[in-house]
């Protein structure tokens, strides 16, 4: 199987869906002439032309609204935000239009639209460009929220999202665009809402998603050196959430650590913790422990970024806690 970059997997997903369905188009800042701010859409303008790969002004509210309107009228837009930090400018269209049109029209109108782009920390970008909004969007009825962690999942999930008749938030990471992974040349789809057991284990369940899966897997490797068998689950999507896979794992391991980049209050990890204690309480040998970013705006200095974000050290400490090693 060939190995390609995360950005290439995204590009292939969009290209294949645009070739399959003439109603699909891409719109956003720098997606056409500049080949995408992160070169995700490189070459797509040449193949599909300016009617289907559309550059926009720096006006997220405007082009998000155009996308929503076109989706309601039968097209299938992919709207790229240069970063989800900028999606806040357009959040009214996402929350009050895209997410609600099906309900408000009594099922007469759907809104098959994908909002995609990078989320979270991407290095020395400081507070306003390093935020996570997965839990914000996942709190909205009518939206689906997908957060892939590797090139294989990115391609299969994005294709499913483009074909979905509901509005989807598809969140990537600037720090993952260059990551390489094995991706089949033949077509495949990954269902939305199906978690993936990336590593099987018996002693503790570690749950994560997106680029923080790297932290979870690195921690599992360290644990294995000390004889601790960690089962690692990649959520893939945070709305809908595959609760069954997590609950079944916890029933086997009896312990759980959740690693998430977002701030701790009202995070995805909060929802998971509630669901685990409600549905697997009798199986728990220790309270669920969460590893989140500290409750602070992210600073600029690399040393402070490392201290605030979830990392392997803090994850190992959390596992020690649930295993009563400290």
Image (cartoon, rainbow, N blue to C red):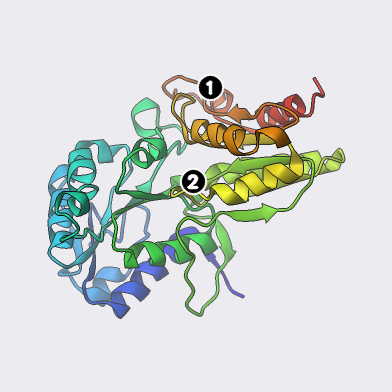
Q: CA distance from mark 2 to mark 1?
A: 18 Å
Residue in view at x 82 percent, y 24 percent: 325
Residue, x 75% and y 45% (percent of image)? Answer: 252
Residue 90 x/y as whole percent: 20, 41
Q: Residue furthest right?
A: 227
Of the numbered discs 2 and 1, the one sitting upstream in the chain is 2
What secondary structure is marked by label 2?
helix
Residue drawn at x 46%, y 27% is 263
Asked whether the beta carbons under mark 2 and mark 1 sit within 8 Å of each other, the answer is no
Q: Residues within 10 Å of mark 1 (few under 14, many from 20)?
A: few
User: Is residue 131 depicted above or below 49 in this figure?
Assistant: above
240 horizontally vs 194: left or right: left
Percent position of residue 280, x then y: 65, 38
Instruction: Give above or below for 194 relative to 307.
Output: below
In this rendered view, identify the residue nearer to me: 295 or 38.
Answer: 295
Question: Can residue 218 be seen here?
Answer: no
* Residue 190 vs residue 125, the one in the foreground: 190
Q: Check residue 122 in the rendering and tell me which mark sits there, or answer none.
A: none
Disc count in the image?
Answer: 2
Q: Residue at x 61, y 46 (%)?
A: 246
The dot on residue 304 is: 1
> Who is closer to the viewer here, 194 or 304?
194
Asked where in the image residue 1 lies, by quadrant, the reply is bottom right
Q: Is residue 257 left or right of residue 64?
A: right
Which residue position is annotated with label 2?
175
Q: Position of residue 57 (x, y in %)?
A: 14, 49
């Amino acid at each position: 199987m060939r190995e390609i970059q995360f950005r290439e997997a995204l590009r292939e997903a969009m290209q294949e869906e645009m070739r399959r369905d003439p109603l699909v188009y891409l719109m956003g800042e720098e997606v056409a002439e500049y080949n995408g701010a992160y070169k995700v859409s490189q070459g797509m303008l040449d193949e599909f032309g300016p009617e289907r790969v559309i550059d926009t002004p720096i006006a997220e509210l405007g082009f998000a609204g155009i996308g929503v309107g076109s989706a309601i009228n039968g097209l299938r837009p992919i709207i790229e935000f240069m970063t989800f930090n900028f999606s806040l400018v357009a959040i009214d269209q996402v929350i009050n239009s895209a997410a609600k049109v099906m309900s408000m029209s009594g099922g007469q109108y759907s809104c098959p639209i994908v909002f995609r782009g990078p989320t979270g920390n991407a290095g020395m970008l400081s507070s306003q460009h390093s935020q996570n909004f997965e839990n914000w969007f996942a709190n909205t009825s009518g939206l689906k929220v997908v957060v892939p962690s590797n090139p294989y999942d990115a391609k299969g999930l994005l294709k499913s999202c483009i074909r979905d008749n509901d509005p989807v938030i598809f969140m990537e990471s600037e720090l993952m665009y260059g990551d390489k992974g094995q991706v089949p040349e033949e077509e495949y789809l990954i269902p939305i809402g199906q978690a993936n057991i990336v590593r099987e284990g018996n002693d503790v369940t570690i749950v994560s998603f997106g680029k923080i899966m790297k932290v979870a897997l690195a921690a599992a490797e360290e644990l294995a050196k000390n004889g601790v068998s960690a089962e690692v689950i990649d959520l893939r999507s945070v709305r809908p959430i595959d609760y069954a896979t997590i609950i079944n794992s916890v029933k086997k391991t009896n312990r759980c650590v959740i690693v998430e980049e977002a701030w701790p209050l009202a995070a995805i990890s909060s929802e998971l913790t509630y669901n685990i204690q409600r549905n697997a309480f009798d199986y728990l040998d220790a309270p669920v422990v969460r590893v989140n970013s500290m409750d602070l705006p992210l600073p600029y200095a690399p040393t402070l970024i490392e201290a605030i974000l979830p990392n392997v050290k803090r994850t190992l400490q959390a596992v020690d806690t649930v295993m009563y090693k400290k």
